[in-house]
Image (spheres, rainbow, N blue to C red):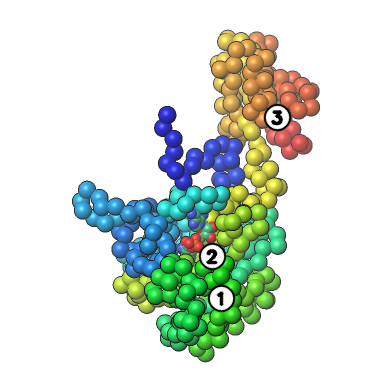
């Protein structure tokens, strides 16, 4: 027997209905905010992530699916999508068109992490990026869109955790203060945190080690080290979020696991997810495009972990997504199959989804199979119906049935579906 690779999984029906509904909602909401879809390759040059997400990040340091291809190229399965979007933006000269580019993506990402509930080696993200917009109004707009989307999925009571990690201008002063603070306590840090302290001390703030967590709880805060433009950016964003009624809390120790952030960073966690409770993360990256060799371009965006989102989406959203199991069209004898096919075509032309039950042995078994599948209505087609151009519609829940003409079948079914 051959099983799926560890940390990957098959998404099966009826769950895929929920996935599809989530994605349709994302596309609809993003369109309303003027975003367009971008699809970048799953396979990217390894160098892209080394130079953006950062060599010292856990992602690049120990979670990459990287290999040398047959042409001796160092490639990898993308661990995230922001770097790919930035690469495409530069490669296709999207900056030359001028103005702001608003892009979104939905697709698989790969990280070699230890699999557990909510953490997979292949997972999917729904993300959005705004390129060419340095104003704090973009930070606010991205969060407004995000909360609009989450609200349509039935989420209530979510709060975004916000922080600013400053810029290249003001961060070094903070990093120095943090180093000074941590230096006398080096013995408390495990080997991973010691490496972080060495390579990128901000990461120590993100440590999962309880002793280190308590140590950093009294560490200096980045917000106190912001230079005036970064502080003003932060304040203006908060003002706009207040005006829009977006629930947030300032989380002075929030740092993200990727190196490209400047100024705004944010995360949303959701109860019910267990240990892996980060539903989404994002932030501003005003140097990423220029660091990758493009023109100086500001950027901000987020990515939602779709696997986690689907896990905790509201019951009512899930129930609505699971509705609409196809109508079963059941020929009563082999001679009635042709007529059953004709009835089914008529229904499909009018947008009604249906299955012709030809596999079942006899109409009784056909009805049983339809019930098992969750169909609410069955259309029975026998000799009498065939000759009279009609059909018997059976309600499998109410246990009632009615004869209707073939002509009015679709409208009758529509009415029945609405009334349920
Ligand atoms: P990230 O925080 O690394 O950010 O990932 C975003 C989300 O992807 C996480 O909050 C989580 O829900 C989900 N995720 C990450 N790893 C896994 C995993 N192994 N299994 C399941 N879900 C996972 C980014 O990727 C940035 N590119 C976000 C961004 C966009 N920043 C700016 N623009």
Residue for badge 1: 215
Q: Name the front one of labels 2 and 1.
A: 1
The vertical placement of 3 against 224, above or below, is above
- Between discs 3 and 2, the one toward the N terminus: 2
Q: Residues within 10 Å of mark 2 (few under 14, many from 20)?
A: few
Nearer the camera: disc 3 or disc 1: 1
Q: Quadrant of residue 27?
A: bottom right
For label 3, the residue is: 376
For the residue pair 359 and 155, the one nearer the viewer reads as 155
Rounded to the nearest angstrom, the CA distance separating label 2 from label 1 is: 12 Å
The location of residue 396, given as percent across then percent down, is 73, 25
Q: Tell me, yes or no, whether the two marked residues, 2 and 1, touch with CB atoms within 8 Å.
A: no
**Residue 263 in picture, x, y percent from top left:** 50, 78
Q: In which quadrant of the rendered view does residue 30 lie? A: bottom right
Which is nearer the eye, 25 or 44? 44
Q: Is residue 209 visible?
A: yes
Mark 3, secondary structure of its residue: loop
SS type, badge 1: helix
Task: Tell me whether circle 3 and circle 2 mark residues in contact (CB < 8 Å).
Answer: no
Circle 3 crowding by C-alpha within 10 Å: few under 14, some 14–19, many from 20: many
Residue at mark 2: 208
Where is the C terminus found, in terms of image quarters? Answer: top right
Q: Is residue 230 left or right of residue 241?
A: left
Please name the residue shown 57% across and 67% down the image.
210
Residue 393 is situated, as x and y percent measured from the top left of the image, at 71, 23
For marks 3 and 1, the one nearer the N-term is 1
Marks 3 and 2 sit apart, C-alpha to C-alpha, by 50 Å
């Amino acid at each position: 027997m051959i099983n799926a690779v560890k940390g990957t999984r098959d998404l099966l029906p009826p769950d895929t209905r929920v996935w599809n509904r989530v994605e349709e909602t994302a596309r609809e909401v993003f369109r309303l905010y003027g975003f367009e879809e971008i699809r970048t390759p799953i396979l990217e040059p390894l160098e892209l992530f080394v130079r953006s997400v950062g060599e010292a990040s856990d992602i690049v340091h120990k979670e990459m699916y990287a290999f040398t291809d047959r042409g001796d190229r160092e490639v990898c399965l993308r661990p995230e999508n922001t770097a790919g979007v930035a690469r495409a933006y530069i490669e296709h000269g999207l900056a030359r068109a001028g103005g702001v580019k608003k892009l979104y993506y939905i697709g698989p990402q790969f990280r070699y992490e230890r699999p557990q509930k909510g953490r997979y080696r292949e997972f999917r993200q729904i993300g959005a990026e705004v390129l060419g917009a340095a104003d704090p109004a973009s930070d606010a707009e991205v969060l407004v869109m995000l909360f609009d989307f989450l609200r349509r999925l039935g989420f209530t009571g979510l709060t975004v955790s916000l922080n600013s990690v400053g810029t290249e201008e003001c961060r070094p002063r903070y990093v120095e203060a943090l180093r000074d603070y941590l230096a006398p306590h080096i013995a408390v840090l495990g080997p991973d945190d010691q490496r972080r302290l060495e390579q990128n001390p901000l990461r120590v703030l993100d440590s999962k080690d309880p002793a280190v967590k308590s140590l950093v709880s009294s560490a200096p805060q980045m917000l106190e080290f912001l230079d005036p433009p970064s502080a003003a950016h932060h304040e203006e964003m908060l003002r706009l979020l207040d005006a829009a009624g977006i629930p947030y809390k300032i989380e002075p120790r929030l740092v993200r696991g990727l190196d490209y952030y400047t100024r705004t960073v944010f995360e949303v966690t959701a109860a019910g997810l267990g240990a892996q409770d980060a539903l989404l993360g994002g932030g501003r990256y005003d140097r990423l495009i220029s660091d990758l060799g493009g023109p100086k371009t500001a950027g901000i965006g987020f990515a939602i972990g779709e696997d986690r989102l689907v896990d905790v989406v509201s019951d009512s959203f899930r129930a609505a997504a699971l509705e609409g199991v196809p109508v079963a069209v059941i020929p009563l004898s082999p001679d009635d199959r042709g007529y059953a096919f004709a009835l089914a075509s008529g229904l499909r032309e009018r947008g009604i989804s249906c299955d012709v039950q030809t596999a079942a042995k006899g109409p009784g078994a056909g009805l049983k199979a339809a019930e098992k599948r969750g169909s609410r209505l069955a259309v029975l087609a026998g000799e009498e119906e065939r000759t009279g151009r009609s059909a018997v519609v059976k309600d499998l829940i109410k246990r009632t049935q009615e004869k209707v003409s073939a002509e009015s079948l679709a409208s009758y079914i529509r009415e029945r579906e609405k009334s349920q």
